[in-house]
Structure formats: C-alpha cells, structure tokens
Image (tube, rainbow, N blue to C red):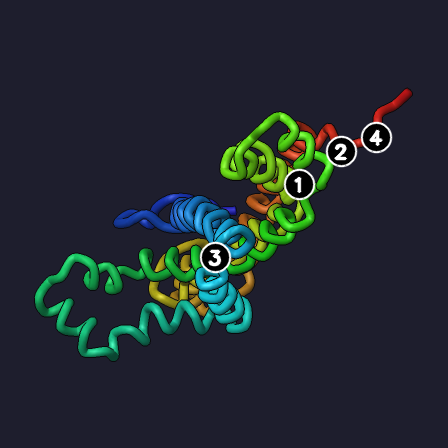
Amino acid sequence: MNEILKTLPAFLWTDGSQLTGLVITAKLFLLSAVFGVALAIALALLKVYGHPLLAWPVRAFSYFFRGTPLFLQLMLLYYGLSQFELVQDGWQQENGFWLLFRDASFCAVLAYVLNTAAYGLEILAGALETYPREEIMAAEAFGMSRLKLIRRIVLPGALRRVIPVFSNEMVFLLHATALSSTVTLLDMTGVARALYANTYSPFFPFLMAAALYLCCTFALLALFMGAERRWLAFLRPRKH
C-alpha cells in the first residue's frame, strides 16, 4: 500500500518537478483526437466530393499512414527529420516552425493526428458514399444546393452513423499514446518505465499503468455509448 501511495502522484499528475502520467496521456489523447477527427472530416470530403486531382493525394496519404506502423511514423518525425540539413539549419537559426520538431509532445501529437486522420477519413468516406439516397432526394426536393445538402444533411448524418466505429478508433488512439514513452515523454507508460528502471521491479509499475489505461478505456466507451443512445436513437426499431 505504501508503494502505491508513493507512486500514485507520478502516475496521475506530477513527479514533483513536472507534469507526468495521466495528465500527459490525457493531453496527448485530446489534442490528437480533436485535430485528427477534424483533419479526417476535411480529407474525407475531399476524397468523396473533391476533384480527382485532389482525391489522389488523399488516397496516397491514407495508404501511407495505414500501411506503415504508427511506431515507425513517430520515429521518423522525432528522430528522422533531424537528419536533414533543412531542419538542422532551422534549429540553428531558431526558426519557430522547425523548432517545434525538437518538442517530443509536438511530434507525438502530429504522428497520432496523421494516423488517426488516415483511418478516420476512410471510415467517414465510406459513410458519405453509402448515405441513404432517400434522404438526399428529400433534401434536393426542398431545393437545397449541393453545398448546403452536404453541410446540413449528409455530413451530420454520416458523423452520427460512424459513432460506433469511431469509438473503436478512439480506444486505439488512447492505447497508442503509450508509444509516447519512446520519445522521452513521461505519460503513464513512461512513468512505469522510469519506475522499472529505478527499482528493477517491472510487475507493479506496469500493472498500475495497465489499471489506469483500463479505467480510461471504460470511461471512453461509456462516453461513446451515451453518444450512441442520444444521436442514434432514430436507427433503433420503435416499439409498438
């Protein structure tokens, strides 16, 4: 019990000198989820409704980030880019843009955003392409323009319908943040690895991290289940 109480602050919010543990994991997850979903929506619209010349780069982006491991993407962003003279010159000149790539948090969030967007755009594009034709025809009968139809009918309806699938994607993203410890970040896994390095006792630190991930996963699933009940009620069969 004493061991748990001693390490609990580090797992939850701070090790006494910096933010660590759950706070870092939550920050990485929330930023990656918000920007990843936003980018997925934009790319899905380009893929489905955009000009073919714009759709091809979107497909290439999707194939690359879905076809390569997330771990390698993170390594390329954090360690790989520093090998290029352009980046090194930017660091020496203290160029604000390139200095971002010295920040492990920025590289981790960028990797998660791009990976989430690649999977998310395929999910959403499928929902857009298979949207019920009857609803589209009804909106067209009211004289809606194509842009207004997409903005008011198709996109909101498609987003509601992919909630169950996106819940799995968000759980995957939450678990993927554990890779952040490989780029020096002290998220929950990073704290567990640091404690293991100090105590040479792997069982308790990693068990503690696993328990926290489990609690976060259940909370996330409960949130999505509530969203499904609220926004997908119209798909459930009505009782007579």
- What amino acid is found at the position of numbered circle 3 in the picture? His
Per the image, the residue denoted by label 2 is 235
| Callout 1 crowding tier (Cα within 10 Å): few <14, some 14–19, many ≥20 | some
Secondary element at tag 4: loop
Is there a contact, CB below 8 Å, between mark 3 and mark 4? no
Nearer the N terminus, badge 1 or badge 2?
Answer: 1
Secondary element at tag 2: helix
Residue 119: image x %, image y %? 55, 58
| Callout 3 crowding tier (Cα within 10 Å): few <14, some 14–19, many ≥20 | few
- Residue 129 is left or right of residue 96, and the answer is right
Is there a contact, CB below 8 Å, between mark 1 and mark 2? yes
- What amino acid is found at the position of numbered circle 2 in the picture? Leu
- What amino acid is found at the position of numbered circle 4 in the picture? Pro
- Can you tell which mark lies on residue 161? 1
Q: Nearer the viewer, mark 3 or mark 2?
A: 3
Mark 3 → mark 4, Cα distance in angstroms: 38 Å
Q: In the image as oriented, which residue stretches furthest toward the left?
A: 93
Nearer the N terminus, badge 4 or badge 1?
Answer: 1
Nearer the N terminus, badge 1 or badge 3?
Answer: 3
Image quadrant for the C terminus? top right
Evaluate whether residue 84 shows in this view: yes
Residue 144: image x %, image y %? 56, 30
- Residue 170 is left or right of residue 58, and the answer is right
Q: Nearer the viewer, mark 3 or mark 4?
A: 3
Secondary element at tag 1: helix
Quick one: 172 or 46, which is closer to the camera? Answer: 46
- The residue depicted at 41 percent of the width and 50 percent of the height is 28
